[in-house]
Amino acid sequence: MPKRGRKYRTSAGHLDRDQLYEADMAFELLKQLSYVRFDETVDVAVALGVNPRHADQMVRGAVVLPHGTGKTVTVVVFAKGDKANEAREAGADFVGDDDLVEKIKGGWLDFDKAIATPPMMGTVGKIGRVLGPRGLMPNPKSGSVTFDVAQAVRDSKAGKVDFRVEKAGIVHAGIGKVSFDADQLVANA
């Protein structure tokens, strides 16, 4: 049995493991029992009871949280011409086309989300082996390959969360920070 620290034992003593808590009460309790010196991320795990090996039971999607995730997101947009200007006006951190692809080929990966216009996907495909394993490759199903780049950038900056069922049939997603109000966490959940 692992030896636990004093702060952990104190927090665990206030929690009744046999009681089911309502969402608002659980988030209030979470805020009270936090003992670390940084702003923790609040995650939700939902057991769906599906088998993701069957194509008709695969659950994936994206949602914009009403109060955001509490993180600042760095957005890269692969676009040319008017779409590049739209992305800059919407608040994209980096906008480019072939020059941005070369920069990423050189090892630069200081961004959280990548968005592309459909004509640029041929160029972005060249760095698919770099972006794909890190979960950064633009995907039409998640809304990151679109002609409406301004809306995609605004959604990403506002706290868009992508979710996907894992092998055991559970969906995990971060819904905010401990510093959020309990009402904000309930709305995000």
Image (tube, rainbow, N blue to C red):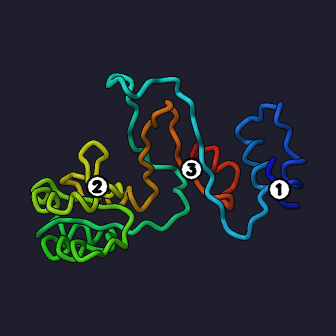
Q: Which of label 1 and label 3 is nearer to you?
A: 1
* Mark 1 touches mark 3? (CB < 8 Å): no
Q: Is residue 90 left or right of residue 174?
A: left
Which amino acid, by three-letter code, is at mark 1?
A: Arg
Q: Give the residue number, with chain letter if any, for mark 3.
A: 175
Tell me the residue at 45%/50% (across/down). 161
Q: Give the residue number, with chain letter if any, for mark 1.
A: 4
Tell me the residue at 20%/65% (across/down). 78
Residue 44 occupies quadrant: top right
Which amino acid, by three-letter code, is at mark 2?
A: Gly
Q: Nearer the viewer, residue 111 or 62?
A: 111
Q: Is residue 4 left or right of residue 181?
A: right
User: How many angstroms separate mark 3 from mark 2 (CA)?
Assistant: 24 Å
* Mark 1 touches mark 2? (CB < 8 Å): no
The location of residue 74, given as percent across then percent down, is 39, 69
Q: Give the residue number, with chain letter if any, for mark 2.
A: 132
Which amino acid, by three-letter code, is at mark 3?
A: Ile
Quarter of the image with the C terminus in it:
top right
